[in-house]
Image (cartoon, grey):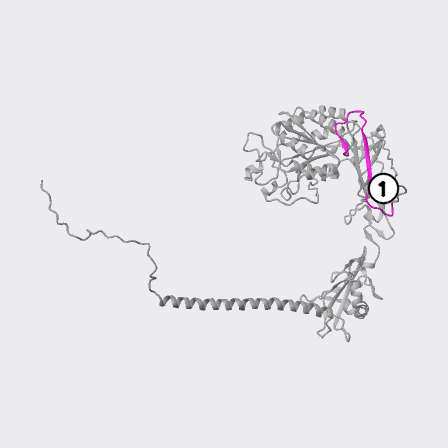
Amino acid sequence: MKEHLDTLKSLGDSLAHSLEQLTKHYKLAFGSFLDKPGMPYILVDPAQYQNPCRSSREERCDQTYLFKHSLNFTEEISQFFQQVNSSKISANVDDLDGALEAIYQILVCDRRFGWSNYARKIILLSTDSLLHIEGDGILAGVSEVNIHELCLVNSTGDHTQPLKYDFPSVGTIKRLLRRQKTNLIVAVTKDKIKMYDRMRKDILLQESFVGELKSNSSNILDLVKAGFNEFIRNVEFSVNTSYSSELDIKFYADCENTGHFIETPGCQNAKEEQEINFKAQFTLTKTTPEYSVESLNSTTLIGLECNEECQEDRDSCRQHADSMTCSSRGDCECGKCICPEPYMGDFCEYECPVSTKNQLICSGNGICSAGDCLCNKNFSGLDCSCDKGTSNCRLGFSNETLCNGRGQCICNNCECSDEYSGTYCEIMRSNQPDSEIQNVFCDKYEANVTNYFTANTTDKLKAQNATRMLQIEEGSKSDYAHCVKYCYHTGSNNVVHLMTYENRCDFMITTQAMGIGLAVGIFVAVVVGGLILIMVKKWDIHKKEKAEYKKFAAASAQFNVSNPLYVSPVSTYENPMRGKRNNSTAGKL
């Protein structure tokens, strides 16, 4: 791939000139990919690992990496070529690479890389290798799939976990390309183009363009133009019905102007100024209070019109003459900055605080103005995440102090002194290292807890408020006396946690407990009885078989006479001359 990289370095102003013929406003980013840095994709010999090109005649190259993001999207083409010129080649063992993982990270890290929301997005993949697909990671012992679509590229642009997740599937890439409204241009050499053509026809027909890359990559700009022109000739409708699940929409198109409509959301290879007729069918799958039908033969007419392209004044999107457009955070449209969250301002110059707890601006408890949070009256803090209330710092007993007087209530949570812990600083550990933990609430508010337990733990209340009584570890309420000492606290969502301490006295067993115990006892008895019965039966069979064998052996010993009907298969023949003296006379010469 060294020749292709050298060609890209030599493009210079010709790249900018070619892109300006396609669109006046564009941004570029740059990254590279190779393969997973582990066996069997690379050689792990120390010398070979440090310099994968050591076995060839190439100059020293970088260590093998899966994906490296070098430059976020920028309007400055000089920065683009600065990164390209500083790039070095690397190597792996096989003729496959991790291009799918590179595309996956580019799509899921869109905000980090600086993708514009209101722009035509294109990924240019230049390669002379085949692809590793989902399942190939098992060769290196990797089978986990990145199902949560995690962005695994750090601030320096390096892939942080190349050997943790498997390669993505082509189907996953198709789904992400459609969701991010991104097209893929694949520039591949002649010996590998057949596989990419088949992948496009079978899966990525509407999302990709595949072109043959010459050996020296001299036609790379021509492929970019061809791919761009093909994408802009595609017309497709899409509707987000996630907020109206009861509404079903189908599109029908007359792509060839023959008067025949087929069910399709779009047409390909549309010509300039060609008129294409579409029909939309809206079906209400179920009626809701929000909808009313006045006539069965009603028609809804939706008029669509496109605004003419405005004349952009990019200078009005700069805060200062030497500053970046929209502070490099947003898109300039018709002389105004369109800022993505969490940025705001005429030039996207302000960044609003985002809570680390719920990922909302100002924690959802205030509004952002000029980069600062204006919190609601019950909240404070830079991101409005601090609750001014005290409900989580007390149990609700009369004359109760916040955090048991052993800590401070900060943001509606107790921060206890060194000797205390717990939700309300109720747990005290004595100075003796072997002493048990003591819950001071059990002594201080025993009467309150007993009254609460007596009034709120009837069988009827337990059945109705099962979620409220989240935990009762041990104990029961007797008709005659309280046999258990209780202590409790309230947790999240006002759930009451009852903790018990037994005083070694008898208490009444409930009917429900007796029924459960009886059922368990019967089940255990049946299982154990069945096992015993099987063992006794097996032992009886063993004894009978042993006695029968002894009788058979005794009978065999008494009858050793041969069977008169038995004919042996062995026949014996004797030579009649064997053993007789030879009386013949010797001959004479």
Is residue 35 one of those drawn in magenta?
Answer: no
Name the residue furthest bottom.
Answer: 480
On screen, residue 381 above or below 465: above
Seen at 76% across and 28% down, the residue is 233
Q: Main secondary structure of the magenta part?
A: loop
Query: Which residue is nearer to you in this view: 325 or 188?
Result: 188
Q: Residue 501: percent from the left, percent from the top?
A: 72, 69
The quarter holding residue 231 reads: top right
285 displayed left or right of 474: right
> Magenta span covers which residues?
263-290
Identify the element where label 1 is drawn.
loop
Q: Residue at x 64, y 66 (%)?
A: 523
Q: Which residue is mark 1?
A: 370
Question: In which quadrant is the N terminus drawn?
Answer: top right
Q: Position of residue 482 (x, y in %)?
A: 76, 73
Res 498 quadrant in image:
bottom right
Q: Nearer the viewer, residue 396 or 518?
A: 518
Which amino acid type corresponds to the residue marked 1 in the rendered image?
Answer: Ala
